[in-house]
Amino acid sequence: MPDNMFTDFPDEASNRQAETFERLLTQPGVRIERIISTGQSSPPDFWYCQPQSEWVLVLQGSAGLRLKDETEARVMKAGDFVNIPAFCKHRVEWTDAKETTVWLAVHYGEERTEDEAGKLD
């Protein structure tokens, strides 16, 4: 596990081979990850859809994040954050190919079923 968010990148990320997800902390109801992107994007027609809410912050670099109900990707740069409710479909349209993008993602709340999420939201 890294001691600094901007160092000790895994080999795959350092060599720009693949986006990497590293768990930094896991506790009941919360998971904190460092995500390192080097020009990757979600596959065509792929949408993330998770049973927990996710708060995500771009620490370095830039990316285009799109929520399913939006027509355009949100351009996110260092300091920008967004809260993604459980089961909100979203995708990464692009990440900066020239600069490493470092994200901090906090997955939180009880994992729910899609039916439970619809009744509570």
Image: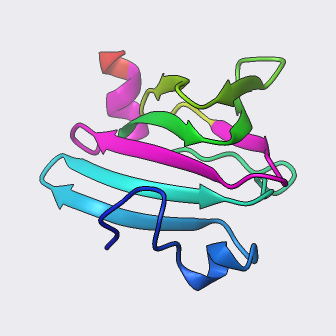
Q: Residue furthest bottom?
A: 11
Can residue 67 be seen in this snapshot? no
Residue depicted at x 83% and y 48%:
45
Position in image of residue 8 (x %, y %): 46, 73
Position in image of residue 100 (x %, y %): 68, 55
Verify whether residue 102 appears in magenta: yes
Query: Which colour assignment does the render follow?
Result: rainbow
Would you say 46 lies left or right of 59 here?
Answer: right
Q: Quadrant of the C terminus?
A: top left
Verify whether residue 113 appears in magenta: yes
Q: Quadrant of the N terminus?
A: bottom left
Residue depicted at x 55% and y 37%:
58
Would you say 75 lies left or right of 45 here?
Answer: left
Which segment did they paint magenta? 90-118
Total labels: the figure holds: 0
Can residue 102 be seen in this snapshot? yes
Would you say 39 lies left or right of 1 here?
Answer: right
Residue depicted at x 34% and y 69%:
2
**109 versus 29 height, above or below:** above
Q: Quadrant of residue 36?
A: bottom right
Looking at the image, which is closer to me, 93 or 5? 5
